[in-house]
Image (cartoon, rainbow, N blue to C red):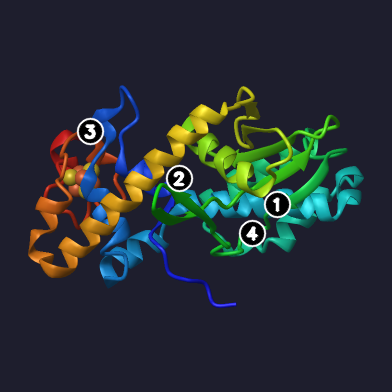
Amino acid sequence: MKQVWLPSVSYNLWSLSDSRVGQEFWFCDMKRGFNKVRQKEPQVKALLEDNKHQRIGKLAQGGVYEFYQNPQLLSQSEGVEEVAAILKLNQEPEEVQERIIVILNNYYKKPILVGKEIIQLSKGDEGFTSPITIQEGSYYFHLYAPTDCTFKQPDGTIHILDFKTGKSDFDRRQAYVYLLAASYLYPQQPSVASFYNLEAVLASDIITATPEQLKFVQIELADIAKRYELEKMHYGENPNDFAKIFPPNPGSACRYCTFNSICEFSVSEVSR
Ligand code: SF4
């Protein structure tokens, strides 16, 4: 059935729309502009596609998936090499290969999904998933909350597990988006969320949310979806106002910004 168009929102849009408390210096509205309204421009597209961090995340997820699908590999001495071959790791840049081998070895030594009642496990290459339609007051929007792994705990609690790689820290807002999605997908069961860094072998606390907290998250997401629709409309009408609609925040954030090579406001060269 054809999906009805509705404004949409995701954790990604939330993270690009609001700064985390105390990390305002990292935040830049213009990144949202590049990511969301200029993503089809060839230069921007190329930068978005050449994202090593995302590539490592997808391959790491693929590795976990293959170990789960072929559990006998966990008891074979060549298990890591076999998964690396399935992932065609030899076709990746050297740094990506090295980091994925570390991740596969970590998982091989500590296969955290063994024995879990898995409900869903992403292969890492699914693309867009179906959204959840949410009504907030008279406003309808689509929530996209693709999950890495969902399993059922022995007591029936739904546990959403998000895999991380690299130095990315755990953002509780992402957990709240998962928990809001779970409240629609599994309304009869309690749910929790957590993060697990496959590279650092580090698990977060278990995160829960009360119905009041989820309502707050839902209102916040509806606001973000509305704001973004307005921005898109303004940009469509006046592309020359890009920097007014998505104000830059030149500074420390530029150094690690995906767009610093094409952003006229970047100060990354100066700060080196
Ligand atoms: S280079 Fe700096 S100013 Fe430009 S989008 Fe990135 S963080 Fe913002």
- Residue 171 lies left or right of residue 18; in this view the side is right
Mark 3 Cα within 10 Å, few/some/many (few <14, many 20+)? Answer: some
Q: Amino acid at mark 2?
A: Tyr
Q: Of the numbered discs in the image, which one, if any, rests on residue 11?
A: 2
Discs 4, 3 touching: Cβ within 8 Å: no
Q: Amino acid at mark 3?
A: Ser
Read off the residue under disc 4: 89
Viewer-proximal residue among 169 and 199 = 169
Q: Amino acid at mark 1?
A: Gly
Q: Of the numbered discs in the image, which one, if any, rests on residue 252?
A: 3
**Residue sitting at 80 percent across and 33 percent down?**
153
**Residue sitting at 58 percent across and 44 percent down?**
99
> Residue 223, can we see it?
yes
**Residue sitting at 31 percent across and 22 percent down?**
22
Discs 1, 4 touching: Cβ within 8 Å: no
Q: CA distance from mark 4 to mark 2?
A: 29 Å
Viewer-proximal residue among 232 and 169 = 232
Mark 3: which secondary structure?
Answer: helix
Q: CA distance from mark 1 to mark 3?
A: 34 Å
Residue that sits furthest to the front in the current view:
138
Quarter of the image where the N terminus is located: bottom right
* Residue 198 pos. (x, y %): 64, 37
**Relative to 246, does residue 237 appear above or below in the rendering?**
below
**Relative to 109, does residue 1 appear above or below in the rendering?**
below
Q: CA distance from mark 1 to mark 2?
A: 24 Å
Q: Of the numbered discs in the image, which one, if any, rests on residue 63?
A: 1
* Residue 41 pos. (x, y %): 26, 70
Mark 4: which secondary structure?
Answer: helix
Q: Earlier in the sequence, mark 4 or mark 2?
A: 2
Mark 1 Cα within 10 Å, few/some/many (few <14, many 20+)? Answer: many
